[in-house]
Image (cartoon, helix red, strand yellow):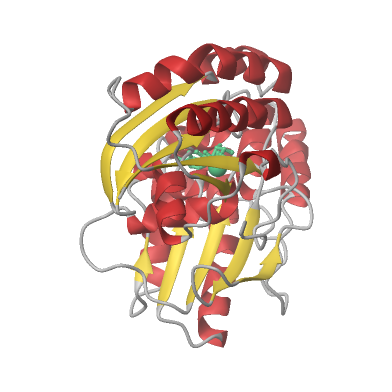
Amino acid sequence: MKILGIETSCDETAAAVVEDGRKILTNVVASSVELHQKTGGIIPEVAAREQLKYIIPVIEEAIKKNHQDIEAIAVTAGPGLIGSLLVGVETAKTLAYTWQKPLIPINHLQAHLYANWLKKGDKPKFPAIGLVVSGGHTDLVLMKNHQQIKWLGGTRDDAAGECFDKCSRLLGLGYPGGPAIGQEAIKVKREKIINKMKLPRPMIHDDNFDFSFSGLKTAVLNEVKKQKNPDLPFLAYEIQEAITDVLVAKTKKVAEKYQIKSILLAGGVTANPRLREKMTKALLGYNLFIPQVQLCTDNATFVAACAFFNFHPVSFSKIQADSSLEIEEVIK
Ligand code: KG4
Ligand code: ZN
């Protein structure tokens, strides 16, 4: 079955056609990130207007101007920025009505996990644990099957991606912060890594699956103020180490507690090479899935894949953009 996925939850306007939930036929992503770089972050109103500009050309490119083969449409209903979400949802409703195809509303956070189905080879097996680390969320979940997702823990304040973004801004390294910090960290001189200041690893030893990243941001601010000429590569390196250490430790803790058959990583932060390396080492012996780098950040392939494995069409009048959906809320 060929499903057209549409994703407009934040600053990417994306459409993709995926066959049987696993094979990517097309994947088109337009990003307004350059506009947001000028303001050092996303202004929701600006993002929504860009969505309007790109949505039709992006879909046209994804379906190659031919919708005859498309059997269903899947669209991100939430969470995200409401103005951006509305563009995708209303466009999807119009297309589904015009083409007379089933329409499946999708939870963006659940969808991120499906980037792990989009590769050749074995599929993830249930029960699985999932770590979703994006710009707005840090969630650890237990997936008993496609429909039953249990939330185990998450951040009490900033998300991991948000911490990268805010720290990057403090260091003047630009937006989005994750890739910017990663690039700066590579320049660190190895001898500086030994015996130098260490940033906190918040809640790393706590006996729960929760996170907290706002204190880390404050610690970085204090370091920047303390140092006359901040050592940017070293600070970037330490920020990346602190965030990734906590993510790895908590994921490992969950893996040790539950009887699981797979571990799924997902979300923009999973594109981070250091996180990928550390997770692979720490979770040796587990059936670990990490999406291809270009499928970690927002795109529509995982929206279409999620719809294939959760095929619950909903009538047009009942589908609404919902900016505050939680990861457990599988839309049925
Ligand atoms: O999943 P995503 O594309 O959008 C949301 O759903 O939020 O995630 C975006 C987040 C941003 O905070 C960005 O800084 C972070 O993912 N990110 C990274 C990397 N690439 C994107 N963080 C660390 N390293 C990266 N290479
Ligand atoms: Zn996302």
Q: Nearer the viewer, residue 48 or 174?
A: 48
Q: Nearer the viewer, residue 3 or 150?
A: 3
Q: Quadrant of residue 247?
A: bottom right
Q: Quadrant of residue 262?
A: bottom left
In the image, what residue occupies the spot 41% across and 15% down?
57
In the image, what residue occupies the spot 69% across and 57% down?
200
The answer to whether 155 is drawn above or below residue 320 in the figure is below
Q: Is residue 294 left or right of residue 180?
A: left
The answer to whether 153 is drawn above or below residue 3 in the figure is below
Residue 299 location in percent, x, y?
44, 37
Q: Nearer the viewer, residue 180 or 312?
A: 312
Residue 55 location in percent, x, y?
50, 20
In the image, what residue occupies the spot 68% across and 48% down?
159
Q: Is residue 22 left or right of residue 107?
A: left
The answer to whether 286 is drawn above or below residue 2 in the figure is below
Residue 264 location in percent, x, y?
44, 64
